[in-house]
Each structure stands twice: as C-alpha cells, then as structure tokens.
Amino acid sequence: METKDYLKDIQDIKEMMSKSSQFISLSGLSGILAGVYALVGAWIAYKTIYFDTSTMGNYKHLVISQEAVYKLLVIAAMVVILSLATGLFLSIRKAKKNNETVWNSAAKRLFINFMIPMVTGGFFILFLIEKEMLGLVAPLTLLFYGLACVNASKYTLGSVRYLGITMIVLGLLSTWFLGYGLLFWAIGFGFCHILYGSVMYFKYERK
C-alpha cells in the first residue's frame, strides 16, 4: 500500500509540474472560430481580388491595385483581431472554470516564444508589401505562423506543434504554387484551424 501511495504522490507531483510549465487554458473552440473567421476573410479577399475591376492578369501574373491591397490588409487585420479577441475571451473563461490563472509564467513564456517569429515575420512581410512583392505574402504568413506555433508549442498543448508543422508544409507548398496563395491561406488558417481546434476541443475540453 505504501508503495502505491508513493507512486501516486510522484504521479501527482509530475502532473502539477507539467501544469505549471504549460499553458493548458488554451481553448480548442477558439481555434475553430479562428478558422471560420479565416474562411470568411478568404472569401471576401477572393471577391476583392478577382471581382475588382482594377485587378488585372491571371493567377500567376496578377496585378492588384493599391486600393485593393489596402482592402486586403484591412480584411487580414480584422481576422487577426477577431481571432485574438475570441481566443483571449475563451481562454479566460476556461481558466476561470478550472480555477486557474490565465497570465501565469507558462502563459508569459508561450506569448514571448510565439511573438518572436510573428513580429519578425510581420515586419518582413510589410517590407515585401512596400516593395510590391505581393506573391510571397501568403506563403510567408503561413511559414512564420507555423514557426511561431512550433516555437511556442512546448509551453502549451501538443496539438499546437502539429498545427505549426502543417502550416510550415503548406507555406512551402504555397511558394511553389505562387498563383494559389489565397487557396493555401484558406486551407491553412481556415480548415487546419478548424481541424486542430476540433481535436483539441474533443480531446481536452469536452467531458
């Protein structure tokens, strides 16, 4: 009996250490909703690009007007803001439900490790937009986001790592098929978020 008690104590200690080093309040439902936002944004972007009278050329040699570029930036910003706000709200709600602290040491490490690739990629993509190298924008958003997920995955649920690897693969494929960047963007930020968000929700949250 004493041996079993010791083993249970060791298991409890390991579980507590794991919880203290990982941000487990991340909501799978927020990933699903972020995917929905991305799909809606991709559809609006598609309408903006291919049904705008100021847009010329085919998929591989598309010429987008400056006005259309501004519209696309607004659409992307709205998707990001909605996704972040939803993720924050649902994570806070989940943490309160489980009597946990949202902004703990694990959350801080997660945030820092996630933002380093994201900020770097954001500035790099802005430079490309300024140079009118728009064909690489979609692939690089996938690549840098994937790198951010992989970099931060050790501080949260394991599914985030696989999401990041999937995004990196899609980003590399998108650089090969430059004319279909919006399609890869929709698959990555839309369908993949919904898929991995559903996995996280049914595996960790639904009881």
Image (tube, rainbow, N blue to C red):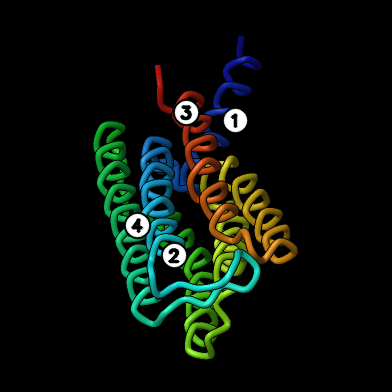
Q: Residue 49 carries which label?
A: 2
- The amino acid type, in three-letter code, at marker 3 is Tyr
Residue picked out by circle 3: 204
Badge 1 is on which residue? 10
Q: Position of residue 37 (x, y in %)?
A: 36, 47
Choose top left, top right, bottom left or bottom right for residue 121.
bottom right
Q: Position of residue 173 (x, y in %)?
A: 72, 58
Extreme-top residue of the structure: 1
Q: Which of 133 and 46 is in front in this view?
A: 46
- Report the quarter where the N terminus lies: top right
Q: Which three-letter amino acid code belongs to the residue tagged 1?
A: Ile
Give the foreground label among 1 and 4: 4
- Nearer to us: label 1 or label 2: 2
Q: Name the foreground residue: 32 vs 37.
A: 37
Q: Residues within 10 Å of mark 3 (few under 14, many from 20)?
A: some
Front residue of this view, candidates 171 and 26: 171
**Could you say whether the residue bearing mark 1 is in a helix, strand or loop?**
helix
N-terminal label among 4 and 3:
4
Percent coordinates x, y for residue 118 in the rendering: 50, 70
Q: Distance between the residues labelled 3 and 1?
A: 23 Å
Q: Mark 4 points at which residue?
A: 79
Sooner in the amino-acid sequence: mark 2 or mark 4 = 2
Instruction: Tell me the crowding category of disc 1: few under 14, some 14 to 19, or many 20 or more residues within 10 angstroms, Cα based.
Output: few
- Which of the two discs, 1 and 4, labels the residue nearer the N terminus? 1
